Amino acid sequence: MIKFHCSCGQKIGVPDERAGRLVRCPTCKMAIEVPKATTPIVPHEQVALHATSVAPPHEPDPVETLANVTTGRGRPTPSRPSPFNRKVVVLVCAAVIVAVSIIIGVIHSLHQGSTPPLPAQIAAGPQPKHVEQREQSTPTPPRPETKILPAAPVPPSPEPVTPAPVTLPASDMSYVLADMLPPQSSNALRMAQDFYAHDLLARAKEILIQITYDSSASDDTKSEALYLLGQIAFDERHFKTAMDDWTKLQTTYPRSARSKEVADRMTQLREVVAKFSDAKLSSIVAQSYVNNGDFWSDGEKTFMIDNSWLPSVEMAIEWYDKVLTEFPKTDGAELAYARKLFALIGWKTPGQYGERYGLKGNFDKYMPQVLQTFEAFEKDFPASSYLQAFRFQIAQAYWVKEDSANATVWLNKIITAGGRGDSFYTKLANARLQKLKHGE
């Protein structure tokens, strides 16, 4: 029987024939190599005689369970490490030594600028003598010592530099004025007028407001800007704002031409404003009271005028003629000519007994006025886009009255004015002429 102690202190006993084999401690379950017996092992022949008590030799697994292990009692005593454990310790130490050598070589190479030695070179030991002599024949020049210089003083931050203004070409200045720079007098005013003509009302108003605050702009330019601001507000049906702009024009620049024009018509303008809108109240409380009253009132909030038995065509023409007299050859005059012709051509009120006005009500009375107005319109505005449409309206009025001769004359005027190109009204005139030729 071989008796020994496990590293955990457990006393173990195994048969002598298990010497040198691995057994497992019944306490800590660690594999332990059985030490060799101190007494000579029984020869094989004697073992065969005691076959009933000793198992024949066999090749068990490297680690066997200790079914027949006898455990001793009492205080465990420390045992010396087994050969297996000593081998593990030696291998671990060798691996640590190799790793430390590699790390030292890498650190040394980083400081000296050379290639770190490989593990094979470390294991091989010193190189042959002739290699050392060859390396000594070509010495490496000493690496200059690196010195850490003191940090340079941080210069003070420079003063912020204001960039010089950029001068743009004249072709680009029209857009710069509107977005970046204050408007420059008459040039900005012309720009605002162009924006207004092209229905860019927001940009036009922005420039015009800037003009009114520009100290370098002349009084005439500022008065024109206020006049146009009021006109834009009037077009947008902001009548109270338009009246405020024109009142400011009168009080600030009373000697300007626009101020005199507005002053002569301020009464009429106030009537127009009262007709179409309510003034904005300065007091919120007063406005709330008015709103409360409106909640209970179902009456109309606009003025209704009964025009029955009134000469509507003549009253309309009177106002259009005022525009033609006071604003000749302006865009207002062009619009007044068109509105006057519409009134003379006439209309019919709805219903079975609706009244007829203009040519539709009295052809012989109003046709001479139509021809006279059209002649003046064509003379003052020969390129107006309204002319072709009114030529066809006159031709159609003659055709309705079954006056084919005059209808043909006016249809040919349409074709002549249209030139060689085809347009809506030239094609329409040709189609109507074909019908007249066939007697329809």
Image (spheres, rainbow, N blue to C red):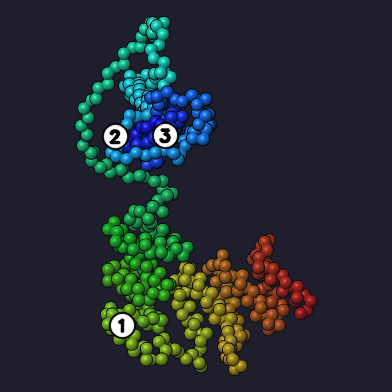
Which residue is under mark 1? Answer: 287
For this view, does 242 lie left or right of residue 377? left
Q: Please, what is the three-letter code of the amino acid marked with disc 2? A: Thr
- Separation of disc 2 and disc 3 at Cα? 17 Å
Q: Quadrant of residue 356?
A: bottom right
Q: Please, what is the three-letter code of the amino acid marked with disc 1? A: Gln
Q: Looking at the picture, does residue 290 appear above or below residue 195?
A: below
Image quadrant holding the N terminus, namely top left
Q: Position of residue 408 (x, y in %)?
A: 71, 74
Count of numbered marks: 3
The residue sitting at 71% across, 83% down in the picture is 402
Q: Quadrant of residue 206?
A: bottom left
Q: Nearer the viewer, residue 177 or 326?
A: 177
Which residue is under mark 3? Answer: 14
Is residue 220 at all visible to an observer of this figure? no
The nearer-to-camera label among 1 and 3 is 3
Q: Quadrant of residue 5?
A: top left
